[in-house]
Image (cartoon, grey):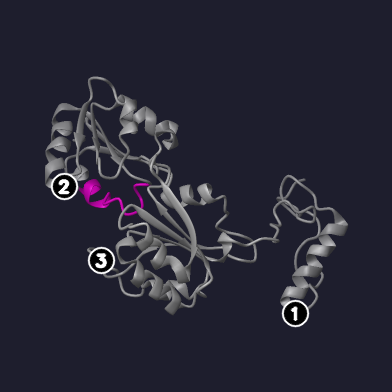
């Protein structure tokens, strides 16, 4: 029989307490037990907790140290808010905890959070998927650390795509990161961003290039809580999305004929020939209403 206890895995976002979602703040406010890691989560998020809530710092606890709290929640019907930095889906060690909660018949829900890579993009004021420059974002970390990487997930292999890449958990080996990025094909002048504790009061966000990434990290003596963004989209200009182009149509908007013809001409030029009639409808078809 399922216990009346419940565990919420809550994404705390990159650091700033006001980047918690409304749901995350509500869950923390309702919890009987709030578990957080002082090494990863800013203390300001605890302002949402009830005055009588049990607050547990898990930064010095292995998972075996947290298990008794989950067991007590199952036995006493308590609600636990387990706060994770960023989004729990990314390097959150959540799956093993979900398995433990399932074994205890605890109800589990996950609250997504703002990831540090999107927070850093916001800080530097850049879109990571610029039309005709980069339409993919690779989230990864350098191989060879404490956690083994699966075959085929080397940084240099990902770098061959030449698109936007966010590198987590890799600052302590910045020289190796730079070497792998260059070996994979990023030119040395490819834009990069080094971000330490993004959105925290002591954040440090520095623009550099792939060729100066190692020197930048060492100059500022960074080795943890640091994210790298790399790729041409970080400096791209002059491109335009079709979404808001007058020649683009969708369910709620008709295309302007002259602008539509220009879009088709551009598409034909990129494809090496004219776009043939019938390749795509010039006006909304079935299921597309203006």
Query: Of helix, strand and loop, which mostly describes the magenta segment?
Result: loop
Which span of residues is magenta-colored? 87-99
Q: Which residue lies under the disc numbered 1?
A: 272
Name the side, left or right, on which 271 lies relative to 195: right
Query: x and y percent of residue 78 in the render?
Result: 21, 28
Query: x and y percent of residue 38 in the render?
Result: 25, 40
Q: Secondary structure at mark 1?
A: loop
Name the side, left or right, on which 21 lies relative to 146: right
Count every numbered label the image shows and give the total: 3
Based on the picture, tell me whether residue 93 belongs to the magenta stretch.
Answer: yes
Q: Residue at x 39, y 34 (%)?
A: 17
Q: Which residue lies under the disc numbered 2?
A: 63
Single out the residue that lies furthest toward the front: 219
Q: Measure how far apart labels 2 and 1 are at the Cα level.
A: 58 Å
Q: Is residue 6 above or below residue 86?
A: above
Instruction: Specify few, some or many for label 1: CA neighbours under 10 Å numbering under 14, 14-19, or 20 or more.
Output: few
Q: Earlier in the sequence, mark 3 or mark 2?
A: 2
């Amino acid at each position: 029989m399922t216990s009346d206890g419940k565990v919420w895995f809550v994404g705390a976002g990159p650091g700033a307490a006001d980047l918690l979602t409304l749901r995350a703040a509500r869950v923390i406010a309702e919890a009987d037990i709030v578990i957080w890691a002082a090494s990863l989560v800013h203390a300001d998020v605890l302002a949402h907790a009830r005055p009588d809530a049990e607050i547990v710092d898990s930064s010095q606890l292995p998972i075996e140290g947290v298990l008794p709290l989950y067991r007590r929640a199952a036995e006493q019907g308590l609600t636990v808010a387990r706060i994770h930095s960023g989004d729990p889906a990314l390097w959150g060690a959540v799956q093993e905890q979900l398995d433990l909660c399932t074994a205890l018949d605890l109800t589990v829900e996950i609250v997504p959070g703002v990831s540090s890579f999107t927070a850093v993009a916001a800080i530097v004021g850049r879109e990571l998927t610029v039309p005709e420059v980069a339409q993919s974002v690779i989230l990864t970390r350098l191989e060879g650390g404490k956690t083994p990487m699966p075959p085929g997930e080397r940084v240099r292999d990902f770098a061959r795509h030449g698109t936007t890449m966010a590198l987590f958990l890799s600052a302590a080996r910045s020289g190796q990161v730079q070497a792998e990025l260059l070996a994979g094909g990023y030119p040395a002048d490819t834009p990069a961003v080094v971000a330490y504790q993004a959105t925290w009061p002591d954040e440090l966000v520095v623009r550099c290039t792939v060729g100066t990434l190692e020197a930048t990290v060492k100059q500022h003596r960074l080795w943890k809580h640091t994210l790298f963004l790399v790729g041409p989209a970080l400096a791209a200009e002059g491109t335009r999305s079709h979404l808001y182009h007058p020649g683009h149509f969708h369910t709620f908007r008709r295309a302007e004929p002259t602008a539509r013809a220009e879009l088709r001409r551009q598409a034909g030029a990129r494809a090496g020939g004219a776009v043939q009639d019938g390749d795509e409808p010039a006006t909304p078809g079935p299921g597309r209403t203006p």
